[in-house]
Image (tube, grey):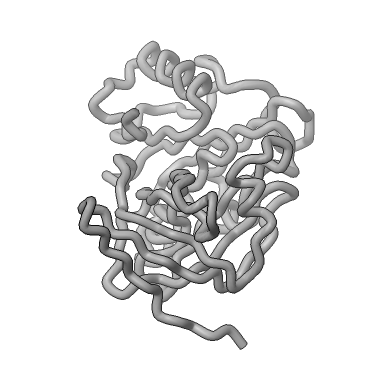
Amino acid sequence: MILFLLPRLINYSTGSMEEHIVKILSIEEVTHDVKSFKVEKPVGYSFIPGQATEVSINVPGLKNEKRPFTFTSLNSSDYLEFTIKIYSERNGITNELGKLKPGSELIIRDVWGDISYKGEGVFIAGGAGITPFISIFRELHYRKKIGSNLLVFANKTKDDIILESELKWLLSDLFINILSDEKSEGYAHGFITEEFLKTNIPALYNNYYLCGPPPMIDAVLRFLYNIGVSENIITMEKM
């Protein structure tokens, strides 16, 4: 049985940002290097699908080491979920997160982010860049409004695809995978190119959503502009 404890709210007089100490309720393996962390949800805490917060581990020496992570749960859920890629080889914060157990404490802060759903469109994600779209797709499914949204998801190998089964279930045939380091039947091979976008997105959409490694996003933006997509219908995190 999991004991649900009310998160403790910290108000520092030196700043306006609220910090909430929350306990980890459960941890699940998603892929070989991705974990799902379900944590307590502070009373009154809410977010728009696609948004994120800064997270740190509530232990001496790591409290002020903040990293941004996207919510992957529904806002209506009584818990928060983060789906996090663990970089164990880097000996950084995600490596420390990967060592935690249920009952460990995290610190979460204010909600922020530029990614939110603006209408049906094409979602293009690379690796862990899928995370803001997970909450969006789950919310759309919950509201029975998944519609004709199309997802193009780039990864190195099949084993790297985060929540592949769920995304197939949510999007059916409107889910295109491309793998850079592996050739496999039913999956495109290589990198996203202008020709790939022309072939797989036969018509222009009203909205385009991008999230992934900066070099990939830079390249995809060039390709989209070249095929006639205007900047004002592209949603992405502004740096």
Image height check: is 29 above or below 88? below
- Compared across the picture, whether 148 is left or right of 112 comes to right
Going 51% across and 43% down the picture, which residue do you hit?
130
| Screen quadrant of the C terminus | top left
Residue 133 seen in the current view: no
Image height check: is 99 above or below 184? below
Going 30% across and 54% down the picture, which residue do you hit?
110
Please state which of residues 72 and 122 is positioned toward the viewer in this rendering: 72
- Compared across the picture, whether 139 is left or right of 67 comes to left
The image shows residue 109 at horizontal and vertical percentages of: 35, 55
Please state which of residues 135 and 197 is positioned toward the viewer in this rendering: 135
The image shows residue 12 at horizontal and vertical percentages of: 26, 59
Going 26% across and 53% down the picture, which residue do you hit?
17
Image height check: is 77 above or below 18? below
Please state which of residues 212 and 86 is positioned toward the viewer in this rendering: 86
| Screen quadrant of the N terminus | bottom right
The image shows residue 79 at horizontal and vertical percentages of: 44, 71
The image shows residue 8 at horizontal and vertical percentages of: 37, 73
Going 44% across and 15% down the picture, which residue do you hit?
223
Residue 199 seen in the current view: yes
- Compared across the picture, whether 141 is left or right of 47 comes to right
- Compared across the picture, whether 48 is left or right of 55 comes to left
Image height check: is 184 above or below 18? above
